[in-house]
């Protein structure tokens, strides 16, 4: 009898787990209340990057004179932009749905909850009655939702969360972004590119507080050069709305005024109503399901992946977790099976210039007292960067001074999200700097800077 595998939540983790388990012979049921692909397709990753692509073209238009062109940048057509974003998400959802259906995955639109260790209750969308199914294994991958503090009266008009911005009803004249993490700085870049005047409230003394200070400084310099106002060391505690203005009041009584406010201050796990307590599944203080390196909860046949697991909140990591869960459910961990190494997951920030990193960071190594070799090469030395008219940024490579093994790297510059893949492979495969330096790369190409940093 095939393994009965029920997945609650059809985001990147759920889709990948369903596809992998089905290929391995499981009887798979996937329950999703919105669209297949989840929040990453519907509200977060894909829509934001689609809008950033539009903003990037507008920014390029404004730099066109340096390339010998005289182009003008018109205000964006919000109706066309909205249709483009919706079209992309619909095509991705249709593609995921078609793939899973072709593999025999049972797709149910509705809400799923645990009614015991091996029982999942499904409440279908529409007027159909709820029913229960028995499962040999369950994956919970319901994601997260934007965090909204009690002091922020979100109305979707002037006070926005990120999910109100794909795109908003109108381009804000003056936007105040609260939150200087990855999501916050991406929205600063996005709306600045679309023509808004932007202020960013930074609770600490640098944007991207979890990133390399040199990387954060490069982004701050670009923000300031393009007119972004940085309000540092400020913690927002209250919002006042008067007519068409919104005032953000900070803990030290500083006030920042805008026509709109966008909150980008983290997320909370979507765990309410899942029946975790009823099934005996443990959660931590933040409400995330506690998992081991197999993504198992304290109830061994109940797994959690994606944002609900409290690990790196990246769609790529969620998909990798989903694949590992499916392999574990189907017993592949008893053979050659590599655990997911979160420390070697590449990530990117789609600002301009782009930012990407992987593996050990310079500041992290120094904090650990670890000896490292750091090399840094600016894109200003790249012929391709000059040709493209965008020589901003650099490549920083971190390696072991004794063995030459590449431990990590950071990139600030055009196409950083693509280029970091080379360093990501090097870190995962334990390659040495010589392996990269001796690789004959295309000329002219931005990737040449990677090899130069390895010399």
Image (cartoon, rainbow, N blue to C red):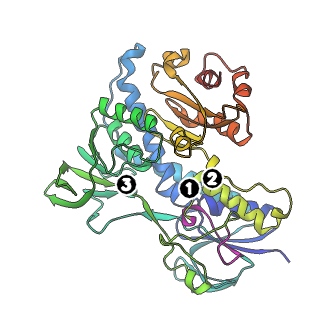
**Was residue 297 drawn as part of the magenta stretch in this picture?**
yes
The answer to whether one can see residue 87 in this image is no
Q: Position of residue 293 (x, y in %)?
A: 68, 63
Mark 1 is surrounded, within 10 Å at the Cα level, by few (under 14), some (14 to 19) or many (20 or more) other residues, namely some
Q: Quadrant of residue 188?
A: top left
The answer to whether one can see residue 368 in this image is yes
Q: Are marks 1 and 3 in contact (CB under 8 Å)?
A: no
- What residue is disc 3 on? 264
Q: Residue at x 80, y 74 (%)?
A: 3
| Drawn side of residue 69 relative to residue 270, left or right | left
Q: Secondary structure at mark 2?
A: helix
**Residue extending farthest left:** 242
For the C terminus, which image quadrant? top right
Q: Quadrant of residue 326?
A: bottom right
Q: Position of residue 48 (x, y in %)?
A: 45, 48
Which residues, given as a range, are shown in magenta? 296-309
Real-space Cα separation, disc 2 to disc 3, in angstroms: 24 Å
Mark 2 is surrounded, within 10 Å at the Cα level, by few (under 14), some (14 to 19) or many (20 or more) other residues, namely some
For the N terminus, which image quadrant? bottom right
């Amino acid at each position: 009898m095939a393994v009965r595998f029920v997945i609650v939540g059809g985001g990147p983790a759920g889709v990948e787990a369903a596809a992998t388990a089905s290929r391995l012979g499981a009887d798979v049921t996937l329950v999703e209340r919105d669209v297949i692909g989840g929040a990453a397709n519907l509200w977060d990753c894909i829509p934001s990057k689609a809008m950033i692509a539009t903003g990037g073209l507008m920014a390029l238009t404004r730099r066109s004179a340096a390339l010998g062109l005289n182009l003008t940048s018109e205000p964006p057509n919000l109706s066309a932009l909205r249709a483009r974003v919706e079209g992309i998400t619909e095509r991705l959802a249709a593609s995921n749905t078609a793939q899973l259906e072709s593999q025999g995955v049972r797709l149910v639109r509705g809400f799923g909850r645990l009614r015991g260790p091996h029982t999942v209750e499904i409440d279908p969308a529409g007027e159909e009655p709820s029913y229960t199914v028995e499962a040999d294994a369950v994956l919970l991958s319901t994601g997260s939702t934007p965090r909204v503090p009690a002091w922020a009266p979100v109305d979707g008009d002037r006070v926005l969360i990120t999910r109100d911005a794909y795109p908003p009803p109108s381009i804000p004249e003056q936007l105040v972004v609260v939150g200087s993490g990855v999501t916050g700085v991406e929205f600063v870049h996005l709306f600045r590119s679309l023509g808004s005047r932007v202020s960013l409230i930074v609770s600490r003394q640098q944007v991207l507080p979890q990133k390399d200070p040199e990387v954060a400084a490069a982004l701050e310099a670009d923000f300031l050069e393009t007119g972004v106002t940085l309000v540092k060391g400020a913690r927002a505690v209250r919002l006042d709305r008067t007519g068409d203005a919104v005032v953000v009041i900070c803990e030290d009584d500083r006030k920042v005024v805008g026509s709109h406010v966008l909150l980008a201050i983290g997320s909370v796990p979507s765990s309410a109503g899942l029946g975790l307590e009823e099934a005996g599944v443990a959660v931590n203080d933040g409400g995330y399901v506690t998992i081991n390196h197999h993504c198992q909860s304290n109830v061994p046949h109940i797994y959690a992946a994606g944002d609900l697991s409290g690990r790196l909140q990246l769609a790529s990591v969620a998909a990798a977790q989903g694949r590992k869960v499916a392999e574990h459910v189907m017993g592949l961990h008893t053979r050659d099976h590599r655990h997911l190494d979160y420390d070697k997951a590449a990530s990117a920030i789609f600002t301009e210039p782009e930012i990407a990193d992987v593996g050990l960071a310079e500041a992290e190594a120094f904090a650990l007292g670890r000896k490292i070799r750091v090399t840094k090469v600016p894109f200003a030395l790249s012929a391709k960067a000059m040709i493209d008219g965008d020589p901003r940024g650099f490549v920083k490579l971190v390696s072991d001074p004794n063995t030459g093994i590449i431990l990590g790297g950071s990139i600030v510059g055009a196409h950083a999200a693509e280029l970091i893949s080379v360093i990501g492979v090097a870190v995962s495969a334990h390659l040495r700097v010589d392996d990269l330096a001796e690789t004959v790369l295309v000329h002219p190409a931005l990737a040449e800077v990677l090899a130069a940093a390895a010399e």
